[in-house]
């Protein structure tokens, strides 16, 4: 173990927690200050977007883009300090984590850049397939692929690395729970089981990952204190 790996891991885990909190606050704020939007047509979305502020949506999307970056940094730190016999697990987790961060990063960057620019200029042709607000768009499918299959596999592979103490078991359980939640969410998306999708992705993943990243920050901090 070295201080650079531990410090990067701590700040990445702490940053992940902060971005998750920002995302949650934005989600609550959206529900509190404006009517819930359910996708129907592009024309209806344009009316909704023009009649309601988009600040919280863009802030939430930016926070998730940054979360993906923090997550990869944290996985790298875990890989560096993992025992030799468990590095095959962390290497797989990191590989899937990179794909996860890339897929959701593409989606969220498109939303806060290209989608925003086109909405501001009144150019709506072709936006249906890149709008995350459209649950049947190609971009929504790309985002779900990242959040379900690859985030799920990354979580399941990194979970067994943590063992021993109570804190390690909390991290292990949180990652295992997240892996199960998002993989079930992926199946639910494919079959359009919307209630199950909401429970697994919005509630299950949100709770499991918040516990995981907060506990992970504490774990890195404790390790820093032992050197």
Image (cartoon, helix red, strand yellow):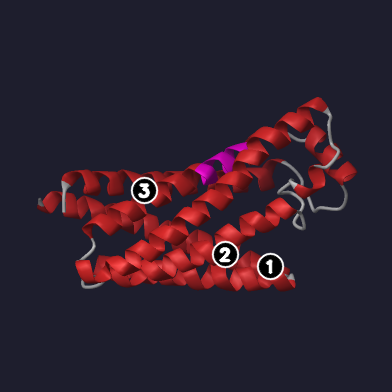
Question: What percent of the width, then of the height, locates residue 82?
Answer: 24, 62
| Callout 2: SS | helix
Q: Sequence-wise, which precedes: disc 3 or disc 2?
A: 3
Q: How far is mark 3 from mark 2, CA to CA? A: 20 Å
From the viewer's perspective, is 12 left or right of 99? left
- In this rendering, the answer to whether 73 lies above or below 212 is above
Residue 116, numbered circle = none
Residue 189 - label: 1
Question: Which numbered disc flags the more N-terminal residue, 1 or 3?
Answer: 3
Tell me the magenta residue range: 58-65
SS category of the residue bearing label 1? helix
Q: Is residue 64 magenta?
A: yes
Rendering quarter of residue 69? top left
**Mark 1 vs mark 3, CA separation in Å:** 28 Å
Give the residue pinned by disc 3: 73
Gap between marks 2 and 1, in whole Å?
9 Å
Q: Are marks 1 and 3 in contact (CB under 8 Å)?
A: no
Q: x, y percentage for residue 64? A: 53, 46
Could you classify mark 1 by the number of other residues whose Cα lies within 10 Å: few (under 14), some (14-19), or many (20 or more)?
A: many
The residue mark sitting in front, 1 or 3, is 3
As displayed, is residue 179 above or below residue 81?
below
* Label 2 or label 1, whichever comes before in sequence order: 2
**Residue positioned 23% across, 71% down in the render:** 85
Residue at 23% from the left image edge and 49% from the top image edge: 6
Q: How far across and down, in percent of the image, does residue 186 sit?
A: 62, 68
Q: Which mark is residue 148?
A: 2
């Amino acid at each position: 173990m070295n201080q650079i790996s531990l410090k990067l891991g701590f700040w990445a885990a702490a940053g992940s927690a902060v971005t998750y909190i920002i995302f949650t606050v934005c989600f609550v704020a959206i529900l509190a200050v404006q009517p819930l939007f359910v996708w129907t047509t592009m024309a209806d979305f344009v009316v909704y977007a023009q009649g309601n502020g988009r600040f919280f949506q863009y802030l939430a999307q930016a926070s998730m883009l940054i979360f993906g970056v923090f997550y990869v940094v944290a996985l790298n730190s875990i890989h560096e300090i993992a025992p030799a016999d468990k590095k095959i697990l962390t290497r797989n987790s990191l590989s899937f984590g990179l794909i996860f961060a890339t897929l959701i990063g593409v989606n969220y960057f498109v939303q806060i850049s290209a989608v925003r620019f086109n909405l501001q200029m009144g150019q709506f042709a072709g936006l249906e397939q890149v709008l995350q607000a459209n649950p049947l768009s190609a971009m929504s499918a790309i985002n779900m692929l990242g959040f379900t299959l690859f985030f799920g596999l990354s979580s399941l592979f990194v979970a067994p690395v943590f063992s021993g103490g109570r804190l390690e078991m909390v991290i292990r359980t949180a990652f295992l729970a997240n892996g199960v939640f998002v993989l079930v969410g992926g199946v639910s998306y494919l079959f359009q089981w919307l209630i199950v999708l909401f429970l697994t992705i919005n509630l299950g993943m949100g709770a499991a990952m918040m516990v995981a990243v907060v506990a992970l920050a504490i774990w890195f901090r404790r390790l820093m204190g032992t050197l």
